[in-house]
Image: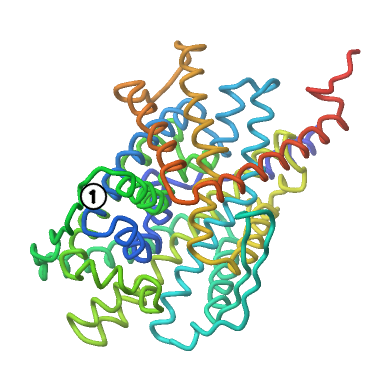
Amino acid sequence: MKETESNAEAAQLVRGLTLSGAVAVNMTDMIGVGPFITIPLIVSAMGGPQAMLGWIFGAIIAMSDGMVWAELGGAIPGSGGTYRYLGEMYGRQKLGKLMSFLFIWQLIFSAPLSLASGCIGLAEYSTYFFPSLNHTFFSIAIPLTGSFHSSLNVNGFTFVAIFACVLAMFLQYRGITIVNRLTKVILAVVVADIAWIIFTGVAHFNPSIAFDFPKNAFSFDSSFFLGLGSAMLLSLYDYLGYYNVCFLGDEIKEPAKNAPRAIIISVAIVAIIYLAMNLSIIGVIPWRSLVKGVDTPESHYVISLMMQKLYGGWAGSLATILIMWTAFGSIFSILLGYSRVPYAAAQDGNFFRVFGRVHPRYKIPYVSLLSLGFFGILFCFLSLTEVIAALVVIRLIIQFIAQTVGLLVWRAKAPKSPRPFRMWLYPLPALVSLAGFLFILFSRKNFTVEIRYAAVIFIAGLVVYLVRTFKKRECPFKVAS
């Protein structure tokens, strides 16, 4: 008996994340390389400085969905995040068990995609120093059915992306208290980087450039809304990460109180930072030059070129180094949060048992950590735009929408259930986030491509789940005793 208790105690995670540490984890995940690489893409999608609408609506959706996460994170504290929420809301031994499994299944794809996007963005900025890294060794198209296709690319910077992923895995292969301190150091440099860029933009801000709207910029036709949908998808990608602390519930001090606070604080701060930064950049760099260079190697490091133009070569180099640090901070935080989710599912017996292993010395879910890192390395061979679109759509369909609907259902079924944090203006934020998710899904050119990706992942996950439950004689193939 004592040996069993000792083993159980050894397998437990350590509560080493304070509120400030939780905010740091969220913000380092959110402020990655995204806002530095998506600026030309978002401006190109809308064809002018009206692209600011993409970041504004993205902030509204992030805060609205953040309310959903905050309520669930306070009411159901514990590692796993959405995995635990879906099980609780839809019924642990009923539909919730299937929903939880499908969430973990899609996470095996979407988490490495998110990880790879940070690694690729970091690697693309490295080409500022080494332009020869833009050389493509080979690219292989992978046709499947119709417009459902992909491609495998090997560039010089692909190897830089892989190195960044391996380094993040190496640094996290240690205790959570060390990770807590390291995350705060990373965030301090990230904030300094952002502050410098905003200060530069404000100091050189030119209203005639910032508000140089093209003709018919606000003609609300189909082209406008298609562009807005694409811009919002990219801006939502920039905001992703505001929920990261929900996956680390067993490693946060007072999670029922600190998880909701960390979400609201991080979304509010990052939204202000993004809006200020992007407006200041649009006020310095003419939007037509951003659109013109969207398909050129120079689009990989727009901010570096801006700082170089304003202050000289030293500033471009320093900006590149700081942005690469920022990107690595996001990579680090993404791997930290998502590696805890398959672990939580495996502990419940609702995922492959090997993911539940905890390192005997460092008390971390090392199998889950290494597995997601390995798949992240594989996805580094895809193009950045393909990675971003695929991960956002897959996550919206199989995770965010199901979770938001689940909260509405759960509120109706169990209105008196303890909730340390209750959504402000309920149910308005949940409805706003749902409307925003659906708009992003269907208001884009060729939107069916990523939806097919999500459908294939969903069907494959459903088949695996049915096979597992059949073998274990569980629902829906439970044998009556």
Residue closest to the eye, 333 or 197? 197
Location of the C terminus (image quadrant): top right
Q: Is residue 167 left or right of residue 472?
A: left
Q: Is residue 418 left or right of residue 200?
A: right
In percent of width and height, residue 170 lies at 59, 67
The image quarter containing residue 4 is top right
Q: Work out whether 303 lies above or below 60.
A: below
Name the residue rendered at 54%, 54% in the picture.
Answer: 336
Q: Work out whether 268 lies above or below 362.
A: above
Name the residue rendered at 67%, 64% in the picture.
Answer: 142
Residue closest to the eye, 45 or 461? 45
Q: Is residue 458 left or right of residue 63?
A: right
Name the residue rendered at 36%, 70% in the picture.
Answer: 294
| Residue count near mark 1 (Cα–Cα under 10 Å), binned few <14, some 14–19, many ≥20 | few
Q: Work out whether 350 lies above or below 124.
A: above
SS at mark 1 in the image: helix
Q: Amino acid at mark 1?
A: Ile
Name the residue rendered at 56%, 44% in the picture.
Answer: 451
In percent of width and height, residue 346 lies at 71, 40
Residue closest to the eye, 63 or 182? 63
Q: Which residue is mark 1?
A: 272
In percent of width and height, residue 447 lies at 50, 47
Residue closest to the eye, 461 or 162? 461
Residue placed farthest to the right in the image? 481
Q: Is residue 45 left or right of residue 246?
A: left
Location of the N terminus (image quadrant): top right
User: How many marks can you see?
Assistant: 1
In percent of width and height, residue 434 lies at 42, 31
Type of colouring: rainbow
